Image (cartoon, helix red, strand yellow):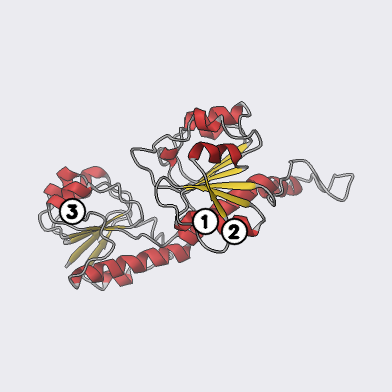
Amino acid sequence: MKIVVLDGHTLNPGDNQWDEVAAFGELTVHDRTPEHLVVERSSGAQIVLTNKTPLKAATLAELPELKLICVLATGYNVVDLAAAARLGIPVVNVPEYGSDSVAQHAIALILELTNRVARYNEAVHGGDWTRSADFTLVGEPLTELCGRTIGIVGLGRIGARVAAVAHALGMQVVAYNPRHRTAPGGFSVTWVELGELFERSDVVSLHCPLTEDNAGMVNAGLLSRMQRHALLINTSRGGLVNERDLADALNRGVIAGAAVDVAASEPIPADSPLLTARNCIITPHIAWATLAARQRLMATTAQNIAAFLEGSPQNVVNQNL
């Protein structure tokens, strides 16, 4: 059996192993694959693995031997699901591997905005504390989270973990889900509509998938409803936010700060308005990428392949086969 990985570098930059996948057949791993080489590299493969390399309808039509597509992620919009279904090709994903890592990163971004660890570290190494007339060095304002309100947009696996940590820090939790509203146990959650969440929250954290319905939903209108001291956190999908509106809100002091791990276009363009926005922390889509999370992703991918070969595919995202 021929297995091809189209873009394996982010999953295994050298500290992870492909052994679990290689056990199923002849494995070829490409670090990255440009679109014009997808058909050539996938030709003859029964199983193709992709993270962000698109598999479009025209591409799939040229791969008659393809039997299974494994998405090396939770999101699967890189694959034309309808085209795969028409061809009888199951598309499987990894729905649960990085929740703890992403939640941890979201909390880290919140704490960076409230506690200014990086800036104070730079100040100390730059000699500011040494030159201080006092035993301390108070410059950048610090914010205590206890007693404040966090608004979770999308109280799923990741959102619930962020909410739990925020609650442990003494924060009140309000949440918005468009449909299913099942709160996790252990702490109180107040369900509100989206606009009210933005109005009430001191911190808004986004944890929802990107769809046609919510693309660009965080726009000037919603941002204008936030409190001036409020913070926006996005570790979900960059396309949820109108980046020009966010940059404008930051620069005009409509909100106090933002921290994002994702951008509407990735890698982030050099002319992105967020790069020059006031008090905007940006990390390069790394929330998911702890070694522990990547090892779980690899293990579940191997389990997905095993289940398919045994005739009982799991984690199938195109059900209309």
N-terminal of the pair, mark 1 or mark 2, is 1
> Hey, which residue is sitting farthest left in the picture?
64
Q: Is residue 12 above or below residue 20?
A: above
Marks 1 and 2 sit apart, C-alpha to C-alpha, by: 9 Å
Q: Position of residue 292 (x, y in %)?
A: 46, 66
Q: Amino acid at mark 1?
A: Ala
Q: Position of residue 176 (x, y in %)?
A: 48, 46
Q: Quadrant of the C terminus?
A: bottom left
Rendered residue at 29%/48% (across/down):
53
**For residue 165, which numbered disc appears in the image?**
2
**For residue 103, which numbered disc appears in the image?**
1
Query: Label 2: how many residues lie within 10 Å, few (<14), some (14-19) or many (20+)?
Result: some
The residue mark sitting in front, 1 or 3, is 3
Q: Amino acid at mark 3?
A: Asn
Of 72 and 29, the residue lying toward us:
72
Query: Could you say which quadrant of the image residue 1 lies in?
Result: bottom left
Rendered residue at 21%/56% (across/down):
319
Rendered residue at 25%/48% (across/down):
79
Asked if residue 280 shows in the view, the reply is no
Q: Amino acid at mark 2?
A: Val
Confirm or deny contact between disc 1 and disc 2 (CB under 8 A): yes
N-terminal of the pair, mark 1 or mark 3, is 1
Answer left or right for 138 relative to 155.
right
Marks 1 and 3 sit apart, C-alpha to C-alpha, by: 32 Å
Name the residue tied to disc 3. 320
Rendered residue at 10%/54% (across/down):
64
